[in-house]
Image (tube, rainbow, N blue to C red):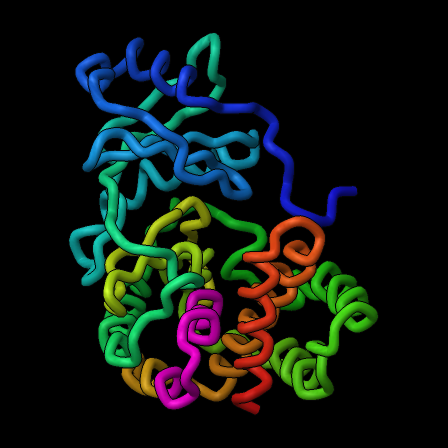
């Protein structure tokens, strides 16, 4: 069992990307290609100055990119922050088994490296409100995002127990907050969610939020999943409170579940990051410390 970053099932390099473009979008092959990043599910290549190519390197991610291609174009126009609406679509071939996308390149640095300024609280709350609208009956189903926290409890508590032996971050306050979140009723209507709104999926430029990326986990479910981002993005307690106040009309149960989801993300990032991704470990530590600070 791999407890760290999931391994790529297919190695993707610039040569493969060029070959796919040559077969399906030959008018783009004059643009330079270079690898930017490879996350848990996808590899990202810069394509010239204005585009990038995003390709799954795990079978699990193949469905996620299809969801992104299908639904993000329908949501993008109502969102007050730029998102990478697909520019071109790629099909499977004999040399590559999954769908892939050519996307606009959004400028900025991921928020784990440059946190948003406190003056972004109102904009971020507006983004969440604009996104959190009722989804159609055929919205993507995601078994690990937007669901009851009780469905995540067994796997998260296994990680919590492991972290208790290796760190001092699982405090009594964290455990109490987690238990309260598990007891909190879902008292809101299911809406559209980003589903994976951690700091590496938020772009920041000169302190301003410049883009929201990686929409593969898009689904319909509990808004608390996305509200967890408040503890992942904003270091200042007053700013976190401002985002939640600007979002407006949040029940105590929803706030408890949001903190519970912040613990989910924090524990996952810290536990896996300590194995093989120091950057994720820092993100997880920050998140857990902030949740504890707000108790």
Q: How many marks?
A: 0
- Pick the quarter of the image with the N terminus: top right
Q: At 32% from the left edge and 61% from the top edge, which residue is drawn?
A: 134
Q: Measured from the top left, where is residue 33 in percent x and y?
A: 32, 25
| Rendered position, 52 above or below 96 | below
Q: Quadrant of residue 147?
A: bottom right
**Nearer to us in this view, 287 or 249:** 287
**Nearer to us in this view, 48 or 58:** 48
Q: At 61% from the left edge and 79% from the top edge, which residue is drawn?
A: 181
Q: At 24% from the left edge and 59% from the top edge, which residue is drawn?
A: 210
- Pick the quarter of the image with the C terminus: bottom right
Task: Say left or right for 46 vs 184.
Answer: left
Q: Is residue 147 magenta?
A: no
Camera sees residue 2? yes
Q: Please name the predominant secondary structure of the magenta segment in the image.
A: helix
Task: Say left or right for 134 vs 140.
Answer: left
Camera sees residue 148? no
Q: At 75% from the left edge and 72% from the top edge, which residue is drawn?
A: 167
Task: Say left or right for 236 vs 97.
Answer: left
Q: Quadrant of residue 173?
A: bottom right
Q: Which residues are magenta?
A: 224-241
Task: Say left or right for 152 vs 65.
Answer: right
**Nearer to us in this view, 226 or 203:** 203
Q: Measured from the top left, where is residue 55 in percent x and y?
A: 42, 30
| Rendered position, 59 above or below 293 | above
Q: Measured from the top left, where is residue 258 in percent x and y?
A: 50, 75
Q: Measured from the top left, where is residue 2 in percent x and y?
A: 74, 43
Q: Quadrant of residue 247?
A: bottom left
């Amino acid at each position: 069992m791999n407890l760290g970053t999931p391994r790529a099932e297919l190695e993707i390099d610039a040569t493969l990307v060029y070959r796919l473009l040559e077969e399906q979008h030959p008018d783009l092959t004059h643009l330079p290609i270079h690898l930017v990043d490879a996350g848990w599910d996808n590899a990202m290549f810069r394509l010239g100055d204005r585009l990038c190519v995003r390709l799954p390197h795990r079978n699990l991610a193949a469905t996620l990119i299809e969801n992104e291609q299908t639904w993000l174009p329908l949501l993008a126009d109502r969102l007050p922050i730029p998102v990478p609406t697909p520019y071109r679509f790629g099909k499977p071939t004999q040399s590559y088994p999954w769908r892939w996308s050519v996307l606009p390149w959004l400028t900025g640095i991921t928020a784990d490296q440059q946190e948003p300024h406190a003056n972004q609280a109102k904009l971020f709350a507006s983004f969440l409100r604009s996104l959190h609208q009722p989804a159609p009956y055929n919205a993507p189903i995601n078994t690990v995002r937007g669901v009851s926290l009780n469905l995540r409890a067994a796997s998260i508590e296994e990680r919590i127990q492991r972290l208790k032996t290796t760190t001092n971050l699982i405090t009594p306050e964290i455990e109490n907050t987690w238990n309260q979140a598990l007891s909190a009723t879902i008292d809101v209507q299911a809406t559209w969610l980003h589903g994976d709104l951690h700091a590496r999926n938020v772009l920041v430029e000169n302190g301003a939020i410049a883009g929201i990326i990686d929409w593969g986990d898009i689904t319909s479910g509990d808004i608390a999943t996305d509200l967890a981002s408040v503890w992942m993005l904003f270091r200042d307690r007053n700013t976190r409170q401002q985002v939640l106040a600007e979002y407006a009309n949040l029940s105590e149960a929803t706030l408890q579940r949001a903190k519970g989801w912040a613990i989910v993300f924090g524990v996952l990032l810290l536990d896996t990051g300590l194995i093989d991704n120091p950057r994720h470990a820092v993100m997880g530590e920050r998140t857990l410390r902030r949740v504890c600070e707000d108790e």
